[in-house]
Every structure is written in C-alpha cells, then in structure tokens.
Amino acid sequence: MVVGKARETDLGRITTVLFDLDGTLLDVDVEAFFPAYFDAVAARVSRYIGPDQFIPRLMRSTTVMIDNLDPSVTNAEAFAAAFFDGLDVGPEVLMPVFEAFYREEFPKLQRYAKPVEGAREVVQSVIDSGRRAVIATSPVFPEVAIRERLRWAGLEDLPFALVTTYENMHFCKPHPQYYEEIVSHLGCQASECLMVGNDVEEDLSAQDVGIVTYLVEPNIIHRGKRPCTPDHRGPLADLPLLLDGARHRAAG
Ligand SMILES: [Mg+2]
C-alpha cells in the first residue's frame, strides 16, 4: 500500500454512481425556468386560488417539505399537508389540476433546458462498466416532472437503479438522511457509492454518511455554508477515465 494512493483506490470500490441532474447532467437556465414554471402553474390553478395567495403558499410548502425529517412522511405528503393547511380548496380538487399541469404544460418548459454535452456518454459508460447509475436529483418534484426532465437531458431510456422523486423519498438535499435513504434503498455500503454533482452544499453533504464525492466543474454552486472539500473534482467528461483507472489500480 502506497501512502497517498488512498484517494485513488477509494474509487476502485465504487459500484454505484449517484448523479445530480441540474447543472450536472442537465443544463437549465434557472433564472428563466423558475419564473416561467411559477407563472405556468399559477395560471393553471388560478380558477381556484389566485397567484398572490398561491405562489407564497407554494414556496412555504416547499420549504416545509425540504425541512421535514419525519421518516414516516414522504416528501409528497409533507408538501400536501403544508399546502392544504387552512386552504378552502381541497386536494381532491387541486391534485388533478396539478397532475394535468405536469402532463400538459410542464413539457413546454423544455425550452429553458438542454442536455449537458457528453452527459449521456458518461452515464452510459458507468452502466457499461457494470456499475449502477442513480439519479439523485433533489426530490421536490413529482415523478412525472423528473421523468420529463430526464427526457430533456436525453437520458429517459437509460436503466437507472433508482430515480429519487417526491413520492418515493422521505428527505431532501442537503440532509444526510436523503443520502442514507438512497444507500438503504440500494442495499449497499455508503463507501461503494460516488455522488457526482455541482452543488457544494447539496451534493457534498453525501460525505456526511460516508459516500465518496466528485464535484463537477465548471458550474459549481457554493453558497458558503459548507467548506468546499470534495474527495475528487473535475469536468464530468473525466469521470469514466477516473473510475476505470481506479478499478485497474485496485485490481493491480
Ligand atoms: Mg445541481
């Protein structure tokens, strides 16, 4: 064992690669996307609740969902409980309206997003190497919306071991419980997993449960709340070579 090689050989054990979506595999014009998304969904529900009441309620309920750490409550349930609390209109009326929105209107927001160049090849190469690929995107959207965003990224047909959504998860980034839940769902060790993402706070918190991290350059988001200490960093395109090199070194 050569001292100093530990950081290379930790990748030799990787069986599972967790990918963030926005800013990592999907290039989203966030400044344009979110206002357009809020306007479109507000317009869709305006018969039942005006935008002045709807938007703050949506934001507040999203924060409650992100902060929820009750393991018996899914993100979808945490969101709905907060959203419908004290509202005159019930979920039996509004949920079908939201569902229709995601089916019919949400796909039009594709104009604010495009695949990250080479992203599909990187994910494909991880799968071809016999490793599992996971979409570890912040699970604040319904599955229908996350599947649609995978389509925008050109990844919808790839065999992911897990795609985190607001229906199947009980926690959100940056809480370590989110990463614990992924590891538990996959039935593996945290140290076999590599989290690949561009957000220091949201993606590097995977380190807190023992997941190895790869910070994707150049679109790094660093709000300063967490020190920027990834295990590895570099362009997305360098990932397959790094993983293959580590496997060969580990085998040798
Ligand atoms: Mg991101």
Image: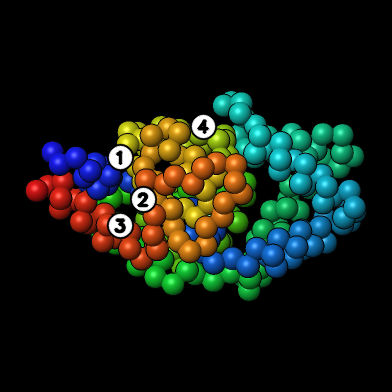
Which sits earlier in the primary sequence, circle 2 or circle 4?
Answer: 4
- Amino acid type of the residue that numbered disc 4 sits on in the rendered structure: Gln
Q: Which residue is mark 1?
A: 192
Q: Give me the residue at 58% from left, 69% from top.
A: 113
Which sits earlier in the primary sequence, circle 4 or circle 3?
Answer: 3
Q: Give me the residue at 87% from left, 38% from top.
A: 87
What distance separates the C-alpha of mark 2 from that of mark 4? 22 Å
Q: Which mark is residue 177?
A: 4
- Can you tell which of label 1 and label 2 is closer to the viewer? 2
Q: Give me the residue at 87% from left, 55% from top.
A: 51
Q: Which mark is residue 232?
A: 2
Crowding at dot 1, Cα within 10 Å, few <14 / some 14-19 / many 20+, comes out as some
Which sits earlier in the primary sequence, circle 1 or circle 2?
Answer: 1
Residue 50 visible? The answer is: yes
Q: Which mark is residue 126?
A: 3
Q: Give me the residue at 28% from left, 44% from top.
A: 7
What distance separates the C-alpha of mark 4 from that of mark 1? 17 Å
